[in-house]
Structures are given as structure tokens and as C-alpha cells.
Amino acid sequence: MGQLKVTQVKSSIGTKPKQRGTLRALGLGRIGKSHVLEDTPDARGQIAKVPHLVQVEEV
């Protein structure tokens, strides 16, 4: 499996607590911060919960 670079592009202010928790689980916390994850179904599921807040690239 490959890797995914996930970057937060929008603020989590005003989002639901579960979405903020998902961002934390992805290793994000502020705009512009990136994290590289393994491309697993778990990671894809988390990204699918907050697609409006993150940008995803394959590495």
C-alpha cells in the first residue's frame, strides 16, 4: 500500500466535536499542517468524514 499526505486547509472552528476528534486522529490540528499516513481503509474512512477540511495527495 502507498501513503497519503493529508493537509488541513480549513479551520475546525464551528465543526462538530466528532469532526475535530477525527482531525486529531489524523495528526492535524491547525491550518497548513500536514501528516503522512499509510493508505489503509481506516485512514480513508477518517478522511471521508472531513473531506471539506482536508486536502489529500498520494505520495
Image: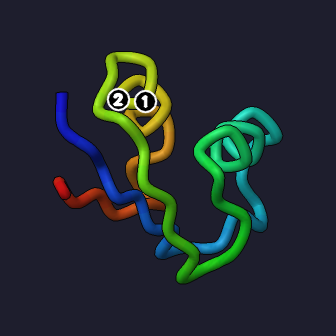
Q: Residue furthest top?
A: 41
Please state the horizontal and vertical placement of residue 48, each as a whole percent of the image: 38, 34
Q: Secondary structure at mark 2?
A: helix
Please state the horizontal and vertical placement of residue 35, each as a whole percent of the image: 50, 60
Q: Secondary structure at mark 1?
A: helix
Circle 2 packing at 10 Å, graded few (<14), some (14-19), many (20+), is: some
Q: Quadrant of residue 5?
A: bottom left
- Please tell me how many numbered marks the rendered image carries: 2
Indicate left or right for 14 with 33 as reference: right
Q: Give above or below for 10 relative to 55.
A: below
Q: From the image, tell me which residue sits under label 2.
A: 44
Indicate left or right for 17 with 46 as reference: right
Q: Give me the disc on residue 22.
A: none
Indicate left or right for 35 with 30 as reference: left
CB contact under 8 Å: marks 2 and 1: yes
Residue type of the residue flagged with mark 1: Ala
Circle 1 packing at 10 Å, graded few (<14), some (14-19), many (20+), is: some
Q: Residue furthest right?
A: 17
- At horizontal 71% and vertical 53% (from top left) the residue drawn is 15
Task: Check the picture and name the quadrant holding the C terminus.
Answer: bottom left
Q: Residue furthest bottom?
A: 32
Please state the horizontal and vertical placement of residue 24, each as a whole percent of the image: 73, 47
Q: Give above or below for 22 relative to 40.
A: below
- At horizontal 33% and vertical 17% (from top left) the residue drawn is 41
- At horizontal 82% and vertical 40% (from top left) the residue drawn is 17
Residue type of the residue flagged with mark 2: Arg
Q: Give me the disc on residue 43.
A: 1
